[in-house]
Image (spheres, rainbow, N blue to C red):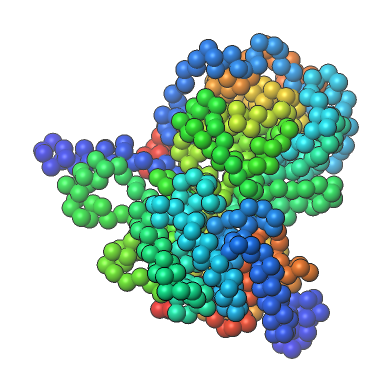
Amino acid sequence: MDRREFLAATAAALAASSCTHSKSGSSDKDSFVLTEFTPAQQAKRRADKQSTVGLIGCDSYDGDIFAAIKKEVESMQLPNFRGKRVVLKPNMVEIEEGHPITTNPAVLAAAVKLVDYLGASEIIIAEGPGHMRDTEMVLARSGIGAMVKKLGLRFVDLNLDDIEAVQTPDSFTGLHEVYMPKTIMAADAVVSVPKLKTHHWVGVTCSMKNLFGTVPGRKYGWPKNLLHQKGITKWIIDLQHIVRPQLAVVDAIIAMEGDGPINGTAKHTGFVVIGSDLAAVDATCIRTMEIAIEAIPYMYMAGQVVGNIDEHAINVIGRSIASVRQPFVKPATLLDPSLIANATRQSS
Amino acid sequence: MADAEDLDKARGLVSSADTVSRAYKKVISYIGNHFHDGSCPYIAGHAPSTEATAWCAMALRNANQATVMGHAVAWLVSTQNKDGGWSTAPGAGRSDWTSGPATLALRVITSDDGDGGTGSNSQRAATQRSIERALAYMFDSRTEFYGSLARLLLFAYKGASGLDYSRGWPWTRDCYHWIEPTVYALLALKLPSRLNSGLYDEIIGRAEQFIIENECKGGGWNHGNMYCLKFYLPAFVVTTSEALLALQETPESVGVKSALDFLVRKEPTDFTAMEYAWSILALNAHGKSTDKLVNSLVSHQNADGSFGLNLMVTALATLAIETAVTNRNPLKYKTV
């Protein structure tokens, strides 16, 4: 190698390594380096006690989903919402015909009934779609707009809501202050109502990742790129501590496999998952997909500072994991993690 | 032909010029009523929004509402951050992408063509200084793809051409570039007339190249991710229309033609107000007929004159209807 070739190679390598901006994914180091946690951070998690997760069989969206949920409510240790203002946050990230991207309105309606049953005095549906500025379009084409209207509920576009500066507890991303919608911060309780999907950047998206939609587009854009650059994995965890969700109701009647969360294909799974420990809910969902929890870095972090991910610490009621488990087509990045590192370097 | 038109009328798809004109007056009145102390919120009753104020002020600039616009200009100037940019709302942290719409509004409504250039000489001078600071911010806030050491090495190895890569604008400073903030910035640099200098030519050229390079397979644009982790991603109507507005100066390019095909191919019967508004403005800027789209948009107007809860969308709809009422597209470059 002569000096010229050496310089060229060095320039290319440095250019790649100092390429400061990944497009929408996390930085490669963020995805694969596990964070060390202080005892104080770990003490905040609820892992000292057993978590309960309801795995409710629901074969289709046409049946009475709430009736199926209600049978198990008493044994699920669900929060008491009496007199509280509760915000339900579905997944409405984007719309593409033929792809099951958004939370089905029937599951959201069942979640509304559950929250009402648990005593809520005010119920709000709120979401800030991650990829599209036209929330009205996503509401119309997902069917959620019609459902909200039918139930006489209020919808808040979290992308346009008034915002306030919020301090980030622990701040694993290094962002110590973030702007959040007032509707979320003023809520007595937030309920995550996601769609179970594979996710090409983080492996699986479920109740914890769903909270990305609480971050306001009016400040961070469409997509919310700053949060991705600071590390999706760490942001998922920071958001749990900022939003403090109290319940999750997961739409896993028809899930998404393959190149989720947008481009994947429908997979009939036939259940709804409910629980107040979102780490335990997501861990249970991932086990039904035959995806190794160890392959999902944010689950490791969640197990340290959010809740239980250990199978022995989660009491699953209703259906058993074994009875609903089926293999999901994994996103290419789970099969070949180097794709993420390469994509970061190429910024593609 | 007449039969087809009658059928469209029966379906409510054709509005008379009077209907469009009435819709225009009604929406102008609606927006005017939502200006308070020179600013507008996104959603009525909420706190002021920089972006909503910018688009609403633009929408009123042709409607003899000089006082409202004068207040809007004053509000924008007074809420500008020290670095020359704007935040989504006053006091909402670092300057962000809303600097594009704010700069665009200030440039357009205080131009010779706008009606909002009223005020004392000192106010005009303050506005001009504000615009100059805003343009400096626009220059500084572009996405810088490589770190300083990498840029030095690229320069050492390749000379000036090593730094000649395309780039646009981010949503938030120091992030990746995306289609929409890049479009807003380009509109701000080109309207009411293009800023002409070697420096701006270079900035504009690189930003346009960034948009062209990120066109989706099959035509059109999404938010800026045409290919991700081995998969091609689809285009959206809104972002395609926005990109087409930015690329008015390259009407013959393959990318623009295929994007126009993409928009025309889309079945607009269930478009939302935002989709109608952006596509009308884009197709009109490229010389395409938009009569039916305007009529469809007008049919979406609410009884109160709005086009939904989001005042920014109502303002865009106003600009789109203006193309039919005045035969003048406020987002069309003069050079085309």
Where is the C terminus of chain B found, in terms of image quarters? Answer: bottom left
Residue B43 at what x, y percent from top left?
67, 56
Whether residue B90 is visible, yes or no, is yes
Q: Residue at x 32, y 65 (%)?
A: B200
Residue A83 figure quarter: top right
Residue B234 at what x, y percent from top left?
55, 54
Tell me: residue B142, above or below residue A106. Answer: below
Residue B304 figure quarter: bottom right
Tell me: residue B83, above or below residue A325. Answer: below
Q: Is A261 in front, or is A331?
A: A261
Q: Residue at x 57, y 48 (%)?
A: A217
Residue B33 at what x, y percent from top left?
69, 67
Q: Residue at x 68, y 30 (%)?
A: A245
Tell me: residue A112, above or below residue B38. Answer: above
Where is the N terminus of chain B found, in terms of image quarters? Answer: bottom right
Q: Is A85 in front, or is A149?
A: A85
- In the image, taking residue A98 as reference, residue A12 lies left or right, namely left
Residue A168 figure quarter: top right
- In the image, taking residue B247 as reference, residue B65 lies left or right, namely right
Whether residue B240 is visible, yes or no, is no
Name the outermost residue toward the left.
A2
